[in-house]
Image (cartoon, rainbow, N blue to C red):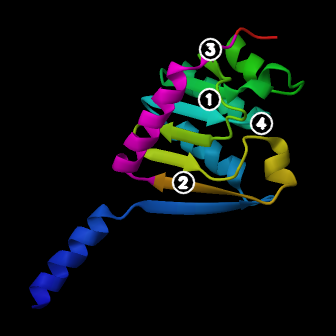
Amino acid sequence: MKNIIFVLLLVVSAHAADIQVFFSPKGGCTEAVVENLNKATNSVLVQAYSFTSAPIAKALVDAQKRGVKVQVILDKSQRKEHYTEADFLLHADVPTYIDAKHTIAHNKIMVIDSHTILTGSFNFTKAAEENNAENLLVIEDVALAKKYTENWQKHLAHSDKYAGK
């Protein structure tokens, strides 16, 4: 009986996702995003409603410079925002798209190397880190990352290439 329970515990723990949580203001959300982007080796998929964080934008560009395939989908509001990082990404040749199909493309996710998901209410903005009450989950789970990737691809299919301001 003890062996059966031990085996069941091993199976359950092997399938449990590794999850970290961060809160803002000033709770390390931006640092967690940058740290995970710095670990990227193959791919980074981003969906963001608001994107004004210079450290996160720099980490995405740095990842691309290391040979990581980075692709970003933003809400249509980023076409008119004064402080968006969309143009910074565009000028660094990071493929950037606008999802204008929805009233608001309110996703805030990253999928890194097909196994790490960053999600939550945390917008990729300076205000989200310094002023707002937001949360960020960092989840290590290949099966869940696959679902997020499939959803990301559905949004890419109806998004337009960002041409800049």
Kindly identify the amino acid type of the residue bearing the numbered disc 4.
Ser
Which three-letter amino acid code belongs to the residue tagged 2?
A: Val
Q: Residues within 10 Å of mark 1 (few under 14, many from 20)?
A: many
Q: Residues within 10 Å of mark 2 (few under 14, many from 20)?
A: many
Could you tell me which secondary element the residue under label 2 belongs to? strand
> Mark 4: which secondary structure?
loop
| Residues shaded magenta | 140-162
Q: Compared with residue 89, is residue 109 higher up or lower down, i.e. above or below?
A: below
Secondary structure predominantly adopted by residues drawn in magenta: helix
Residue depth check, mark 2 versus mark 3: number of the one nearer the observer: 3
Looking at the picture, tell me which residue is in the foreground, 25 or 76: 76
Whether residue 161 is in magenta: the answer is yes
Label 3 amino acid? Asp
Pointers 4 and 2 in contact (CB under 8 A)?
no
Q: Secondary structure at mark 3?
A: strand
Q: Earlier in the sequence, mark 1 or mark 4?
A: 4
C-alpha separation, residue under disc 4 versus residue under disc 3: 22 Å
In this rendering, the answer to whether 4 lies above or below 92 is below
Of the two numbered discs 1 and 2 on the same chain, state the one appearing first in sequence.
1
Q: Which residue is mark 4?
A: 53
